Every structure is written in C-alpha cells, then in structure tokens.
Amino acid sequence: MTLHYSVEDLRPLAILKGIPELTLEWLVSHGTRIDLAMGERMFSRGQPAEFMFIVVNGKVQRFEEIGGQT
C-alpha cells in the first residue's frame, strides 16, 4: 500500500511556505511518500535525477566518497 501526505501535512513545511494551495494539491496528487530507515539511501552517485525529494520528517546526511574513502 502506498501512503501519501495530505496538503495539511505539507503546508507547515518551511520549504513550501507561500506555495499556492493548487500547487500543494498537485504535489499531493502526483507525489509518492517513501519512508526510509536510518542509513538507507535516497539515491546513489551517478543515478539520473528523475525525482524531486521533499524531506517531511528527519534529516538528510550527505557523504561523498573520494578515492575510496568517505
């Protein structure tokens, strides 16, 4: 079962402040909620940018591997 957020869930997010109601409704109707466990990757290096991510809960950490080391 795919879960979705509601407009009410997205409205308080700082990154979406000032976004028109119709745009929030579009995001809800076209978006898919993805729940990740701690340490699970949203994407990998070299993967095409085919999606937009909005982090609703939690945080994102970025790690870069250079010469085999992080």
Image: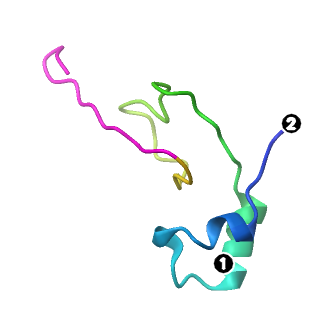
Residue 9 image offset from top left, x and y in percent: 68, 64
Q: Which residue is mark 2?
A: 1
Q: Give, as a three-letter code, the residue at label 2.
A: Met
Q: Which residue is mark 1?
A: 23
Task: Tell me the quadrant of the picture where the N terminus can be found.
Answer: top right
Reply yes or no: does residue 67 show up in magenta: yes
Residue that sits furthest to the left in the current view: 67
Residue reaching furthest right? Answer: 1
Extreme residue in the top direction:
68
Quadrant into which the C terminus falls: top left
- Establish if 47 lies above or below 40: below
| Dot 1 alpha-carbon crowd within 10 angstroms: few under 14, some 14 to 19, many 20 or more | few
Q: Quadrant of residue 3?
A: top right
Q: Secondary structure at mark 1?
A: helix
Measure the C-alpha gap from mark 2 to mark 1: 24 Å
Secondary structure found at label 2: loop
Query: Is 66 left, or right, of 33 in this rendering?
Result: left
**Residue 57, x across and y down, in percent:** 55, 49
Closer to us: 26 or 50: 26
The answer to which of marks 2 and 1 sits earlier in the sequence is: 2
Q: Position of residue 48 (x, y in %)?
A: 46, 41
Question: What range is drawn magenta here?
Answer: 58-70
